[in-house]
């Protein structure tokens, strides 16, 4: 199981420290939650913060755009150092075009689905995605509880990407902790995003070790 700590749960005044601790603690990606106060009821960070964070880590930056107009910002987040750029299926008017904008810049493209969004919304864009993110909370805030109905959705998502002709990484985000990560592993999830489970404990390495141990 790969772990992508979400710096949303880190100290906003010390992002450099938060990413260094995650890298030293054995994280596989750094998950960056971008929120615009419109698509979700919270405002977080923009491209200039992403480029500042980039200097503090050699891990891939996994940038999760929870914004209404992704097309307008895709190039700027890639210029800032995003290695994976995930947009929401609910956001752009022309999803295929948005995904091609990402793929044309030769980084990995991700697509995220809110909890209530059906999986069939990605049926016709599978060849254009490298990562499928199943949201297991309603996006906007860290520290929320995993929505149990998402278990079935994750298992259907796994089956769908196994049928695809291209390789697609399966990621889950929201409410992941040491008590449910084992189940995520059994469902075939490749990457778990974890915010509060990593940063709230005070010992980032120990928290990542625990998540990895419990996913075996
Ligand atoms: C939710 C964000 C998540 C979230 C994860 O809007 O996309 O990345 O902050 O935090 P936890 O692990 O605390 O649910
Ligand atoms: Zn996220």
Image (spheres, rainbow, N blue to C red):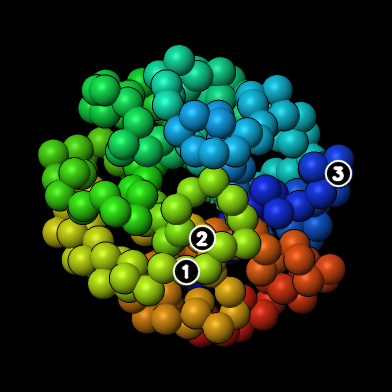
Front one among 122 and 93:
93
Q: Earlier in the sequence, mark 1 or mark 2?
A: 1
Q: Is mark 2 within 8 Å of ligand 1?
A: yes
- Could you tell me if the residues under marks 1 and 2 are in contact, i.e. CB atoms within 8 Å? yes
Tell me the tag on residue 84: none
Q: Secondary structure at mark 2?
A: loop
Left or right for 12, reference 109: right
Residue at (76, 29) in percent of width and height: 52
Q: Residue furthest top?
A: 72
Left or right for 170, reference 118: right
Tell me the tag on residue 14: 3
Residue at (71, 35) in percent of width and height: 54
Front one among 106 and 67:
67
Q: In the rendered image of this protein, does residue 164 appear above or below residue 68?
A: below
Instruction: Calculate the distance from the C-alpha at mark 1 to the C-alpha at mark 3.
Output: 27 Å
Q: Is mark 1 within 8 Å of ligand 1?
A: yes
Q: Position of residue 211 (x, y in %)?
A: 61, 76
Where residue 193 sits, quadrant-wise, is bottom right
Q: Name the residue carrying label 2.
A: 174
Q: Name the residue carrying label 1.
A: 146
């Amino acid at each position: 199981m790969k772990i992508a700590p979400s710096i949303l749960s880190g100290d906003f005044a010390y992002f450099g420290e938060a990413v260094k601790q995650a890298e030293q603690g054995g994280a596989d990606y750094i998950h960056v939650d971008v929120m615009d106060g419109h698509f979700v009821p919270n405002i977080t960070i923009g491209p200039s913060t992403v480029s500042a964070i980039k200097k503090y880590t050699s891990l891939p930056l996994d940038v999760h755009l929870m914004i209404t107009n992704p097309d307008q910002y895709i190039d700027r987040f890639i210029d800032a150092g995003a290695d994976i750029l995930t947009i929401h299926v609910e956001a752009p008017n022309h999803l295929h075009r948005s995904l091609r904008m990402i793929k044309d810049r030769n980084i990995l493209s991700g697509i995220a689905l809110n909890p209530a969004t059906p999986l069939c919304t990605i049926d016709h864009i599978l060849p254009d995605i490298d990562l499928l993110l199943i949201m297991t909370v309603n996006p906007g805030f860290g520290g929320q509880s995993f929505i149990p109905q998402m278990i079935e959705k994750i298992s259907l998502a796994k089956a769908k990407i196994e049928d695809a002709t291209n390789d697609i990484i399966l990621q889950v985000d929201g409410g992941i902790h040491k008590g449910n990560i084992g189940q995520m592993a059994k469902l075939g999830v490749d990457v778990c995003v974890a915010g509060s489970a990593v940063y709230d404990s005070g010992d980032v390495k120990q928290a990542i070790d625990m998540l990895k141990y419990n996913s075996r």
